[in-house]
Amino acid sequence: MPECIYQNDAACWRQLKQGNTEALGYLYDTYIDRLFHAALKMTDNRELAKDALQEIFIEIWHYRASIGDVNHSYSYLVKVLKSIILKKVKRKVVVNELHDNEQRLQEDENIEEIIISSERITEQKSRLNIALAQLTSRQKQVVRLRFFEGLTYEQIAIKLSMNYQSVNNLAFRAMINLRKQMC
C-alpha cells in the first residue's frame, strides 16, 4: 500500500474533485490490488476484470466534479466496479443476441419479411421518438443517462445532483408515460 499522503480518504476525494491527478493515482495505487480480487469474484473473465479496473478510474476522473462525499473509498470503488462489469456483460449479451438474430435473418427470412421487419422497426422508432418528446426535460435526462449511457440510478443521482429516490421517481413516471404512448 502506498504511503499515505492524505489525512483520510475524504481529503483525497476532495483533492480529486478539484482536479488533482495525484489523488487519483493515490486511489489507484491504494486500491487496485483489492479491486482486482473483487473483480475476479464478480467475473471469471480476467480480461473483463482488467478492462473494468481501468474504466473505474477513467469514470471517476470523468465524473469527479459530480461525485458526492465519499467516506469509504473501497466500498464506493467496488460499487463503480460492479456497475461497469454489469454494463460490459449486458453489452456482450446484446451483441451476441444481435449476432444470433443476424444469423437467423440470413438463414430464415426472405426479402419480404426483411422489408416488413424494417418498416416495423422504423415505425417503433418513430413512436418512441414521439413518446420521448412528451416527457419532461428531467425525465428525458434520466432516460438518456439510464438507457442510452447505461448509468445506474445512483450514478444519475450524483451526476444530476439529485437524491436517489427522486431519480427513481422520475424514471418510474417516465416509463409509465412511455408505455402509455407506445400502446
Image: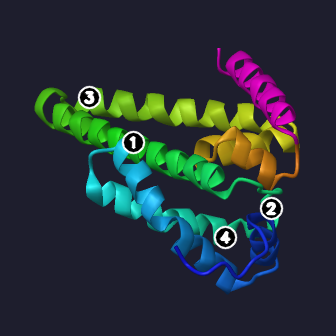
Q: CA distance from mark 2 to mark 1?
A: 26 Å
From this viewpoint, is residue 149 visible?
Answer: no
Q: CA distance from mark 4 to mark 2?
A: 9 Å
Q: Nearer the viewer, mark 1 or mark 4?
A: 1
Residue at mark 2: 66
Q: Position of 23 compared to 2: left or right?
A: right
Q: Is residue 144 above or below residue 101?
A: below
Mark 2 touches mark 3? (CB < 8 Å):
no
Q: Residues within 10 Å of mark 1 (few under 14, many from 20)?
A: some
On residue 62, the disc is 4
Residue 30 among magenta residues? no
Residue 146 locus on image (x, y percent): 65, 42
Residue depicted at 87% across the width and 33% down the height: 166
Dividing the picture into quadrants, the one containing residue 19 is bottom right
* Mark 2 or 1, nearer chain start: 1
Residue depicted at 59% across the width and 80% down the height: 25
* Mark 1 or 3, nearer chain start: 1
Residue at mark 1: 42
The image shows a total of numbered marks equal to 4
Looking at the rendered structure, the secondary structure element under dot 2 is helix
Q: Residues within 10 Å of mark 3 (few under 14, many from 20)?
A: few
Three-letter residue code for mark 4: His
Residue 95 locus on image (x, y percent): 32, 45
Residue 136 locus on image (x, y percent): 87, 38
Residue at mark 3: 112
Task: In the displayed orientation, state which residue is furthest to the left.
Answer: 107
- In magenta, the rendered stretch is 163-183
Three-letter residue code for mark 2: Ser
Q: Nearer the viewer, mark 4 or mark 3?
A: 4
Mark 2 touches mark 1? (CB < 8 Å):
no
Looking at the rendered structure, the secondary structure element under dot 3 is helix
Q: Main secondary structure of the magenta part?
A: helix
